[in-house]
């Protein structure tokens, strides 16, 4: 849950990048770290990667400055995607305010996307949260591979697979090139801050 | 599309998956290609192709096993520990010492048991926190210590004057409960949830991307072990894919072959590319004897570039 200090007009919230292993969650944070230098408030910490795989989580603190009279700080996290690290994902999800679900556009990862979304649903439930209520944005990653002849799912198919019921905002993206990364984060922050305003009435008119 | 093109396309697909770290998917494709080639005896270079694919399947198979097998939780840096303490403790700010307790428990949750135990033991001096701290040592201890060792921890507390007789009795009950639960789980064949841990023999790639690497035609390798340890030998690169380099060593080069141990790191390697010479560290990811074809008996060695020296 976000830390909202109405006296000091400060909000600190937590956004978690979720998704199957190797879908590009860390690459999203890497891109944000490299590109949005003005907003980045500290080093990106990866705990701990081996062979490029996130084992614990990645962490990147960013600041949005003053919005509606409040200083907004955001903690971005990723979870380890591999199936067996479920307990770590549950830990990282504690106190989450908004979620980016990063789905892999490769056809061979279709089932993994669905399994991961189901895992998110179950882990949120365990944390007392509802996937239909929490601010959530979908990202269909690896669209840069459309230029190759690799078997990729269409965005329409991914919408049908993952977003038919949730009906949340979704973005085709390539975390490697940065396409859609900023748009995904911006939309997630908008949804999260709107949600937090409903809860805490923090914004000054 | 003819068979050769089909095989080429499939191998490209498998390599893409491998580069993305999707080892199972890459393995499936390589197996399908292997099957395709075996069923067709009229393919040119059939044996050599099969041997290369078989080597790839072996490496990927090994990688898959490593990914499945959780090892010890990695030792974290102080910075990482501080972050975990700060971000995951969810303690009660109104209770004195609660912050230390929450931080230590977070460390235990992330597999840093020894450090967590040390921090929890430092709370034994606080009357309000001693029992909770000791209870946490037992609860998390069962995930990291054999039951005998955990019992030993409890026995040491029996001689610790800070614990009253009632407290020792209560902790004994907690220990019994913890051991019983663990025994029940083990008997039921319930797998203990693995600690987040590194895939033991995959190498960490901290500083370079595949795209950053130039084509490497040969390497100068200081032999890490054996009677010629330290001697630099120059070897031609058979095949390169980004950070992965493949060498084929003749069976006559026995000393070099024996010197290269799988999962070993070798620093001070010189990389010769057509445009530059640079140095760095490699990781021996696989070594395999070629089982068939004209190079039967020779060895194929896979190296992964871990680090490039700057300047």
Image (tube, coloured by chain):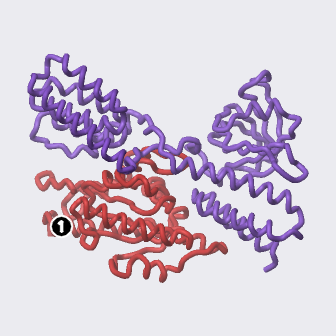
Residue visible at 69% across and 49% down in the picture: B244
Task: Label 1, secondary structure: give it.
Answer: helix
Residue A38 seen by the camera: no
Residue ranking furthest to the front: B187
Where is the N terminus of chain A found, in terms of image quarters? Answer: bottom left
Q: Residue B17 occupies which quadrant of the picture?
A: bottom right
**Which residue is painted at 39% across and 55% down in the image?**
A79
- Tell me which chain appears red: A
Q: Residues within 10 Å of mark 1 (few under 14, many from 20)?
A: few
Chain containing mark 1: A
Pinpoint residue B40: horizontal percent, then vertical percent.
83, 71
Q: In the visual, does A42 lie left or right of A156?
A: left
Q: Colour of chain B?
A: purple
- Rendered view: B308 above or below B46: above
Residue for badge 1: A197
Q: Looking at the picture, how far across and down is residue A140, in whole percent?
A: 47, 71
Tell me the quadrant of the picture where the C terminus of chain A can be found.
bottom left
Where is A110 relative to B59, above or below?
below
Which quarter of the figure has residue B44? bottom right
């Amino acid at each position: 849950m976000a830390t909202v200090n109405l006296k000091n007009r400060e909000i600190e919230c937590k956004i978690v990048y979720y998704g199957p292993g190797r879908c590009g969650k860390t690459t999203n944070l890497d891109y944000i770290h490299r590109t949005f230098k003005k907003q980045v408030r500290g080093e990106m910490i990866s705990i701990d990667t081996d062979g490029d795989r996130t084992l614990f989580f990645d962490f990147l603190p960013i600041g949005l400055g003053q919005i509606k009279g409040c200083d907004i700080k955001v903690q971005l996290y990723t979870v380890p995607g591999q199936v067996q690290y479920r307990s770590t994902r549950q830990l990282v999800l504690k106190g989450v305010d908004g979620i980016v679900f990063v789905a892999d556009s490769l056809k061979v990862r279709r089932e993994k996307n669905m399994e991961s979304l189901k895992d998110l649903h179950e882990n949120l439930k365990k944390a007392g949260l509802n996937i239909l209520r929490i601010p959530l944005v979908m990202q269909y990653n690896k669209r840069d591979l459309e230029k190759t002849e690799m078997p990729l799912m269409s965005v329409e198919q991914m919408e049908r697979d993952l977003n038919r019921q949730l009906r949340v905002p979704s973005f085709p993206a390539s975390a490697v090139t940065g396409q859609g990364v900023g748009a995904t984060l911006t939309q997630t922050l908008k949804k999260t801050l709107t949600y937090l305003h409903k809860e805490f009435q923090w914004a000054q008119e | 599309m003819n068979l050769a093109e089909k095989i080429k396309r499939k191998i490209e697909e498998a390599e893409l998956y491998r580069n993305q770290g999707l080892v199972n998917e890459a393995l499936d494709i390589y197996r399908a290609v292997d099957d395709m080639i075996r069923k067709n005896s009229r393919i040119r270079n059939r044996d050599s192709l099969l041997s290369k694919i078989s080597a790839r399947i072996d490496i990927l198979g090994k990688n898959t096993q490593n990914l499945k097998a959780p090892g010890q939780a990695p030792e974290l840096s102080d910075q990482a520990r501080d972050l975990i303490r700060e971000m995951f403790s969810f303690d009660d700010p109104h209770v004195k010492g609660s912050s230390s307790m929450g931080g230590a428990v977070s460390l235990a949750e992330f597999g840093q048991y020894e450090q967590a135990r040390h921090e929890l033991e430092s709370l034994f001096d606080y009357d309000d926190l001693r029992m909770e701290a000791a209870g946490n040592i037992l609860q998390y201890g069962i995930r990291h210590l054999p039951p005998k060792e955990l019992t030993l921890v409890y026995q040491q507390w029996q001689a610790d004057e800070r614990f009253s007789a009632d407290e020792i009795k209560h902790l004994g009950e907690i220990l019994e409960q913890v051991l019983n639960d663990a025994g029940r789980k083990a008997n039921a064949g319930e797998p203990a949830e693995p600690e987040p841990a590194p895939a033991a023999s995959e190498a960490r790639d901290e500083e370079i991307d595949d795209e950053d690497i130039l084509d490497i035609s040969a390497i100068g390798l200081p032999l890490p072990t054996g009677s010629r340890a330290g001697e630099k030998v120059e070897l031609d690169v058979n095949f390169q894919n980004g950070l992965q380099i493949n060498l084929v060593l003749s069976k006559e080069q026995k000393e070099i072959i024996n010197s290269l141990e799988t999962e070993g790191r070798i620093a001070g390697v010189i990389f010769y590319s057509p445009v530059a010479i640079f140095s760095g560290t490699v990781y021996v990811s696989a070594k395999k004897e070629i089982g068939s074809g004209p190079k039967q008996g020779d060895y194929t060695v896979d190296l992964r570039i871990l680090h490039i020296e700057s300047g």
